[in-house]
Amino acid sequence: MPEPLEIVILGGGTAGWMTAAALASLLPPTGWRVRLVESEEIGIVGVGEATFPEIKYFNDAIGIDEAEMMRATNAGFKLGIEFVDWGFKGSRYIHPFGVHGPAHMEHLFHHQWVRALRAGWKSEIGEFSFAAQAARNCRFQFPETVRRSINSAYTYAYHFDASLYGAFLRCIAARRGAQRTEGKVKHVVQDSETGDIRSLLLESGETVAGDLFIDCSGFRSLLLGDTLGVGWEDWSKWLVCDRAFAVPSERDELSPYTRSTAMEAGWRWRIPLQHRTGNGYVFSSSFISEDQAAGSLIQGLHTKTLAEPRMLKFRSGRRVAAWANNCVAMGLAGGFLEPLESTSIYLVQIAIMQLVPLLPEKRADPRLRDEFNRLMDLQYERIRDFLILHYKLTTRDDSEIWRYCAAMDVPESLTRKIDLFRHDGIIEKYKDGLFTPTSWLSVLIGQGLIPENYSPLADAVSEEELIYQLDKFRENIRDRVDETLPHDRFVDRYCAADSAA
Amino acid sequence: MKRRIERVVVVGADAPAWMAAAAIQGSLGCGLKVRVLELPSRLRPADCYSALPALGGFHGRIGLHEDLLFRVCQALPCAGQRLSGWSGASLSFIQGYDQSPPVSGAALSFTQYWIKGRLRGLRTPFENFSLAAMAARAGRVPVPLEAGEFRAAYGYNVDSGAYSALLKHWATGGGVESKSAAIASVEIEGDRIAALVLADGERVEADLFVDASGPQAVLIGRMPEAEFESWREMLPCDRMMVASARPLRPYPAFSQVSAFREGWVGLLPLQDRTAVVACYDSRETSDKEVLDSLPFLANRPVAGGAAVSNLAKGIRKRTWVGNCVAVGEAAFALEPLDAVQLHIAHNCISQLMSVFPVEAGDFREAELYDEIVRRVAVNLRDFQLAHFKLNRRFDEPFWDRCRDIAVPDTLERKLDVFGARGRVPLYDDETFQEHGWESLFIGHGLIPQSYDPRVEAIPEQELIAKVQDRLQSVRALVEAMPPAEQFIAETAAVRETTSSAHI
């Protein structure tokens, strides 16, 4: 039997415990040892209380029972994100986790919709999405499994308390053999020749040696950034927000969507949980003072605060390599993209799911490292472009930040996407990347960009016939939504948390 | 709304030209006119198109029922490609057209189990676990099954002349105009074609010109910044010979591709004959030598009518310039291997349909089309290049040189990551998915050095059971498939009872 591979995870935040739970669950019982080093003195950021539907794959893969997890984390379901005041003041759209129009003709639907619009038949594209309409009406049900039925082509995510989710995973990790070591890192010991990390020397004097180190130390990036000196690629000229205030308030309506409202110097979130509502204001310190931002956040609340606002500082960007030497960064240690589309937990999850199949053996293999980095680069860059889209595509000119964003140069990959869509409604596809054409469509149109032309393929039926079909489809969705349970009742039945009952 | 594209002129011959015309007319026919200027055919009587399963989807989109292929194109269904002699000795392997069902998240594929088995001494070849490969071996057709863990599909071998005639009939029946023509000159203004002048003096204008003229590239070849970028250094065969041999009975369900000293020879089974195609390097051998040895290489007598041609491989620097878009081999050309020939045409045409210009005179879709086509081309080129790069025929100058070919980064990464861990980095716009690349690499002897660590979580006994189960399932599924003769008869019978064919 060969020596087991020693995997050391540094940091016990959401990223750290997700990694520990996943490795402890997915890897075979022998051949590996997973050890997590954390210090109770170091606070955690607790990234993201809102998630993306891919989280379900992660939970399923490590064998988490959905209802149990939801009970333990005060969770609710999430069918999309509502964007208020983004494209222009008074605008409101939902980016749903599902298609617009009939599922089997997804690529053509929006062209048909534009055609009807141009012919004078007015409608909102969201009226053609079951997920968007269910969200709007605070309804929820699991997707139908019958293909082609109107309420089948969507997925869902969760709103949950990220620190409780972390604690939930911590139990799983511990149960499945991950070891936890309390302590603060005093010194990182490197191989003098290769620079590989050999061990962590803790303040207690204990030495934690390992073959592979997973840096979940948060923004500090203690191993990948500080120790190995992997550079930072800054994206803050496109994603200008650099601060956030977060504050919980008493529970109000348990809506099955996240709300993001564009503000005078950034945007605020509203995330409904069973026991409280999470709120926050993501802003740019170049455009507003911290005090003003905190004041603005409090002023906009509908219910009483449950704690003092807490401030976080960050920069958008990523480490130029997520894996260097024998160290892989997960979560904030590897990069940061603001939580506008609830991608923080997704980025941890995808990193874990890419790492597991490529996990090195005792001897490092640069081929595996390079492939991991290639895949992660694609994920980061494509999410980055999608986030920038929200800022760039605005006609707001009521405050400095929006004037700046509307005028800024964006990555060329994004410029072309916007131009093509504006001209002919074409949405480029890619293989690796979270956001599908469906998502791009929601945001492009939601921000107010209606294509000037539509594909000639949408001319196949007569105008009357097309409008008749669209109208009927819209009606079907309305009927289905009416038959769907209210979200809060669904949650009560399925996964009511003890504390929230 | 500005003016739509109203007039489309397709210039070319044979299947690609008619495929383009039929697709455009069929999808957009209510708003525009498609006219084909038909150049003299480049086909020889012995030519045969080998097509991937995706061609079936294309037929579906233009409304062409596949039984016509079996009735009038001498077609046979084909479950894969069998390669012999590429790895020296007499080793053969089949690349079957398996279709892996979409896996959610990061599910573990069977390939990872096989790799562990192999590293621990499992002797059963990879192809024994492939539904299409086993169907191919058994001479059976992998008809679609109810959704299950394994899926496979079939492609086709069709007589090129008959298939082109069928598509011409189909396109013109659908409203496409055509005229036999010779291009006297092309009037180009800036990056636009103002008009084509035909030999009979007619001046032809159009909103969009589609170049489907094959490697001659009669339109795109004259456009600015659309020079031909050769891939000769990566795909070294530069001559191609076609001929015919007697038909094989019972019908085989695969194409046979055998390597020889200076190239490879393919046997493509049709109903009434076997098409023989040889591709080789003129630096190593002559047409005469190949012709003389063809019966030996094909392992059967070869009928008269062998024809030879040059084989250029590469891509246009731009595949869409101004109002001129290239499809098929006018855009990029590869070896007539891996059944990619027609795929190049219908893939380009499908891409064109998905980014079809919305406005006459404005062609900003060109850049996107060009990028997608280039990615498709590079991925396919890498697939073919891997056959040559991974050969193990030693002490033969042609093959020794092939092993030394400097491979581009795109393929290097695939070889590296597969060699290390048995995973295939797939890029945007891949024709072949995981299984295609896995069977290519493993078939040529590239065995991964390690496997997904999650495999170790499965107890040895369970793993053995999984392997045996899979073998049994594949065997049972193959036994239920029809032999090619039966499949063709049934297809025709179904068609006769359900509709009145109009051909």
Image (tube, rainbow, N blue to C red):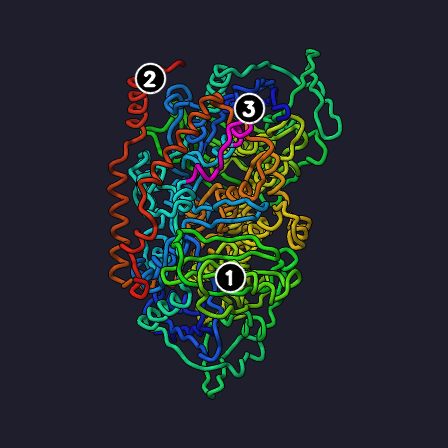
Specify the farthest residue to the right: B190
Image coordinates for residue A352, horizontal then vertical, percent:
44, 62
The quadrant of the picture occupied by the N terminus of chain A is bottom left
Circle 1 is placed at which residue position?
A280
Q: Amino acid at mark 2?
A: Ser
As helix, strand or loop, the secondary structure at mark 3 comes to: helix
Q: Is residue A465 magenta?
A: no
**Crowdedness of circle 2 by 10 Å Cα count: few (<14), some, many (20+)?**
few
- Tag 1 subunit: A
Q: Bounds of the magenta span?
A: A114-129
Front position in the image: A491 or B180 = A491
Q: Is residue A35 above or below residue B317?
A: below
As helix, strand or loop, the secondary structure at mark 1 comes to: strand
The quadrant of the picture occupied by the C terminus of chain A is bottom left
Separation of marks 3 and 1 at Cα, in angstroms:
59 Å
Q: Residue at x 25, y 38 (%)?
A: B479
Q: Amino acid at mark 1?
A: Gly
Q: Is residue A125 magenta?
A: yes
Front position in the image: B322 or B435 = B322
As helix, strand or loop, the secondary structure at mark 2 comes to: loop
Separation of marks 3 and 2 at Cα, in angstroms:
28 Å
Q: Tell me the number on the disc at residue B17.
A: 3
Q: Tell me the number on the disc at residue B499.
A: 2
Let me know if marks 3 and 2 both belong to one chain: yes
Image coordinates for residue B473, horizontal then vertical, percent:
25, 45
Image quadrant of residue A75? bottom left
Q: Residue at x 35, y 55 (%)?
A: B114
B121 left or right of A118 in image: left
Image coordinates for residue A108, horizontal then vertical, percent:
48, 33
Q: Nearer the viewer, mark 1 or mark 2?
A: 1
Determine contact: label 1, label 2, CB under 8 Å.
no
Q: Tell me the number on the disc at residue A112.
A: none
